Image (spheres, rainbow, N blue to C red):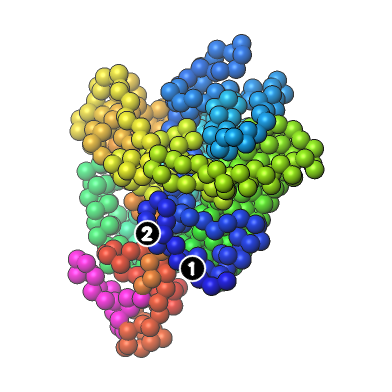
Amino acid sequence: MNTETKQCQNCKSQFTIEPEDFNFYEKIKVPAPTFCPECRLQRKLIFRNIRNLYKRKCDAPGHTEDLISIYRLETQARVYDQKFWWSDAWDATEYGKSYDFSRNFFEQFGELMREVPWPNLVSTNSVNSDYCNSVLNMKNCYLIFAATDSENCGYGEQIEFTKDSFDLKRAHKNELCYETLGCNNCYRTVFSAYSDDCSDCAFVWDSRGCTNCFGCVGLRNKSYYIFNKPYSREEYFERLKQYNLGSFKELSAAKAEFFKFSLTQPRRYARIYHSVNSTGDNLKNAKNCMVCFESFGDGIEDSRYADHLYGKPSRDCHSVFTLGGGELCYESISIRDCSRILFSKKIWTGHNVEYSYNCHNCSNIFGCVGLRNKNYCILNKQYGEREYNELIQKIKEQMMDMPYTDQKGRLYKYGEFFPPELSFFAYNETVNLEYSPLRKSEAEARGYKWKERDKKHYQITKPSRELPDHISEVNDSILNEVIGCAHEGKCDEECITAFKLIPQELAFYNKMNLPLPRLCHNCRHFERLKQKNLPKLWHRACQCNGEESEKRQGGNVYKNTVPHFHGSDHCPNEFETSYAPERPEIVYCENCYNSEVV
């Protein structure tokens, strides 16, 4: 089949469906999408809230305990304590319904979503980590999300096997680290991004195997460097004294200096390693994967428009988000150890599942919610195999003949993910703010719900401007203060306007000689994310112009340190990159970049 150009139902922009896409749709027997890849991602992510927590009561019969939950009390979700939810005290098939062919499928599924109970959080085998969600094997952690096997950590997301660290995003095997993004196997490393195997470093970017480095970009196996210049051990520590990171004022100046310096150094067009014929960013061990992001599995193959493929091998998966081992999965989110999962959310260990949500160890189910260990169910009602297969075919035909129409007039036939109107969450409660940020007016214009900030009833006792400048000036009385966030709720970062320190956190700042933060944990999270590119690609050319780079915004020019393969001519290489053309960074192809940093 030839390439076909379509207009997105949602944003009205044009998008292309390639022959490889059509081959995949034919393999899994689904029609081609009517939403572009970006809008398909938005639509899936409107169902994923992992960071926003609320207090509410347990809805289980005879239970009145208070819960911490991802579901607001105002939603129509029926919420159980997760331990009770996973018990045998109830059965989701009790809510089973016969399919009504006089009504649209999505209307019936939405009713089932509001009737079947939901676990308040996802937290397995965790100790003293009540304010964490989507976690496994955690101990003494606070406000940690999407994480496993970590201890004594706070304010982080996507962390694994990490200890005694705070304010992290995507961290693996780190210890005593602070304010890092995409760092792995690091020790005592702070204010750094995309660096591995580093210790006793501050402000390092895309560096490997470095020790005692400060303000450096693109270094490999170096020690005693400051802003990419080598020093003797004695000189290094002497010069480092001018950067007193225990002072908030001096730390802020160091941040600004490093940011300015980082723009003078070349960036690799994409962080793609050990991969063949693949495009995207932050990929490892990928083969024939197009427009894929942040995927570091043991092998991912023949996939498209996929984000967060991790752990076990995956192949032939399109338009998925967060997949831990799978095959022939499409338009689904939060999938683990599965095959042929279509238009579904949070399916763990399943096969041949369509239009289902929060089902575990199930096969051959359609339109189900909250099932465990079931087969041949439709709308949570049990059927025999033959009756199930006959009924499924009729339902798919009815979905084509009787589509769901949302408030914006968009049609949802068989082949489209759940309409956003079915989600319990508002746009700004979900991870869409990280992957596809919109302002309130933009979100509402596209038919997404928006949650207004809750009115706060606390009294700020210590505005951030009144905090001591240096950590040495802080005593334990600060633990009693309600500190005002410096953004004062005036930012677009879901500011909670005030925060308190926990004892474990204060002890960490003292140990690491770091000043108290001036922003709430939400604002710090979004400030951290500004170092991370959005999952979108642009076609660009390498900016290496012979012996130096092209001149960029701000007048930045990088002088090459060695001759490149193209000599004094402009590099001929082109690529797909997540750096937009108007960005100020100097972007090199892999060949030119490796000539400078390897």
Q: Residues within 10 Å of mark 2 (few under 14, many from 20)?
A: few
Residue 114 in the image: above or below residue 512: above
Examine the image and state in which quarter residue 498 appears: top left
**In the rendered structure, does residue 551 fall within the stretch colored magenta?**
yes
**Which region shows up in magenta?**
541-558
In what quadrant of the picture does the C terminus appear? bottom left
In what quadrant of the picture does the N terminus appear? bottom right
Residue 275 in the image: above or below residue 59: below
Question: Distance between the Cα atoms at labels 2 and 1?
Answer: 14 Å
Q: Is residue 122 visible?
A: no
Looking at the picture, how far across and down is residue 214, in whole percent?
34, 57
Q: Earlier in the sequence, mark 2 or mark 1?
A: 1
Looking at the picture, how far across and down is residue 198, in whole percent?
46, 56
Pointer 1: what residue?
Answer: 4
Q: Amino acid at mark 2?
A: Ser
Q: Secondary structure at mark 2?
A: loop
Foreground pick, 532 / 426:
426
Query: With 57 as the anchor, is 589 left or right in this view?
Result: left
Q: Which residue is located at x 26 percent, y 39 percent?
A: 491
**In the rendered structure, does residue 555 fall within the stretch colored magenta?**
yes
Examine the image and state in which quarter residue 428 appears: top left
Looking at the picture, how far across and down is residue 446, in whole percent?
36, 45
Pointer 2: what residue?
Answer: 13
Q: Which residue is located at x 56 percent, y 51 percent?
A: 415
Looking at the picture, how far across and down is residue 271, in whole percent?
46, 64
